[in-house]
Amino acid sequence: MTGRERQAAACLLPSFPGARAPDWVRRFVADGGGGIVLFADNVPEHGALRALCEELRGERGDVLLALDEEGGDVTRLHWREGSPHPSAAALGVVDDVGATERVAGAVADELALAGVNWNLAPVADVNRPDNPVIGTRSFGGDEKLVARHVAAHVRATQRRGVAACAKHFPGHGATAEDSHRELPTVQGDPLAGLPPFRAAIDAGVRSIMTAHVRLPGYGDEPATLNRRVVHELLRAELGYEGVVVADALEMKGVSAGVGLEEAAARAIAAGVDALCVGHDVGEGAVAAIRAALAARVDESRLAEAAERVRRLARWAAQPTPAGAVDDTARAVARRALLVEGDLSFRSPPRVVELRPQANIAAGEPADALAPIVVREREPVPEADVYLVRDAHRHPWIREAADRRGAVVVELGLPVWRPAAARGYVATYGGGRVALDALADVLALVPA
């Protein structure tokens, strides 16, 4: 491997399926590759994740091992049973900065114990209700609220030696499209989403992830490939000096029409330092991306990016859990519940889950939450309780769930209210801790 190829490899964060690292991944790490992004299928159970991280650290002690552990619906550690940590939306509703610090610290403790040293969280987007991919992953729709909770999350995470990552710069919340599928455009004031990122920078955040979105007034390129956004806005104007990491390269918002190799080269040239590559992109494609970076990116820019990644790896080489345990997560989930109307039942209710297409970032739930799961265009049986998610975005769910005498449980954002149903509960997320809080409320209601 040439010197330029080694610099290029330091900028790459590939992935792979399964709980054991294939030979090419071990070679990539040993030869100075930037790090690895882990997903749910790398975590059949916690012990396996620890063993995997130890295996990779055996190749190189300061390798970056990252995953998305946001709490709520987006979890890699708890993908089977659901997250024991509340969503950002629940934390935002409660609006207790100390609680957010304790929850973020508990997440970072879990990661450090497993050997993971980079959490691709928190979400710093200021959400709008019509957004199809952010939703309960955001602390809310008020920029000041989001900013203070993002800063709290960053501080608590990084006290454990786990790097935090504020995402998705310059803000994905004010979009109506999903960048996994297409290139969204930020709506309204293009700079309205910046305050949470300013707060993250002030809190010392070690990494910021770019969004594959178009920012009006800054050209037609996705932010990830746009030097005006990454270098001029984030670096020069906001003064950020840490690692800039791109969201996954295979997402259509960045690579559709130009391909992975061209998108990678343009991103690094624009000022991005590290590139996430999903586990459906194998060894050959990773090697082609590395070669493209070595051939197409200015040598000084490539060296600068590689050194930033290595600096982060040195900082995060020894994550250390604090070990504090309390009941903050359960208390937050319970306080966040929105309860309206009559929830009483004389006998165990019949429950139907009306499930829309899954948020790609969260993935499909491993298990059904109800005995009957219904998707669009399927017949919907009568039930006492309908579990819905973001019903305001799905007409078929609103039509099916709003029945006289029923109780509607909203697992997403409580934007829509049923007219005929007798009771309504919003949990601000479908994680395990939120569902446990819901069960407690239903059980407390006298028959």
Image: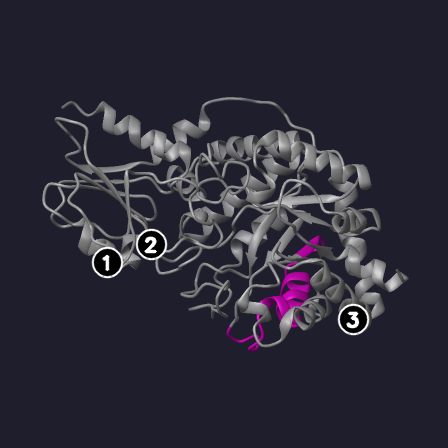
Identify the secondary structure beneath mark 3. loop
Gap in angstroms between the C-alphas marked 2 and 1: 9 Å
Instruction: Please name whichever residue, 68 or 332, is drawn nearer the observer in this view of the structure.
Output: 68
First in sequence: mark 3 vs mark 2: 3
Q: Which mark is residue 356?
A: 2
Gap in angstroms between the C-alphas marked 3 and 2: 42 Å
Q: Which residue is mark 3?
A: 297
State if disc 1 and disc 2 touch (CB < 8 Å): no
Q: Which mark is residue 396?
A: 1
Stretch in magenta: 216-244
Is residue 305 positioned above or below 63 on the image? below
Please name the amino acid that badge 3 sits on.
Val
Please name the amino acid that badge 2 sits on.
Pro
Please name the amino acid that badge 1 sits on.
Trp
The answer to whether any part of residue 138 appears in the image is: no
Write down the quadrant of residue 286 in the picture: bottom right
The answer to whether any part of residue 157 appears in the image is: yes
Which of labels 3 and 2 is toward the front?
A: 2
Instruction: Please name whichever residue, 285 or 167, is drawn nearer the observer in this view of the structure.
Output: 285
Identify the secondary structure beneath mark 1. helix
Is residue 280 a member of the stretch shown in magenta? Answer: no
Which of labels 1 and 3 is toward the front?
A: 1
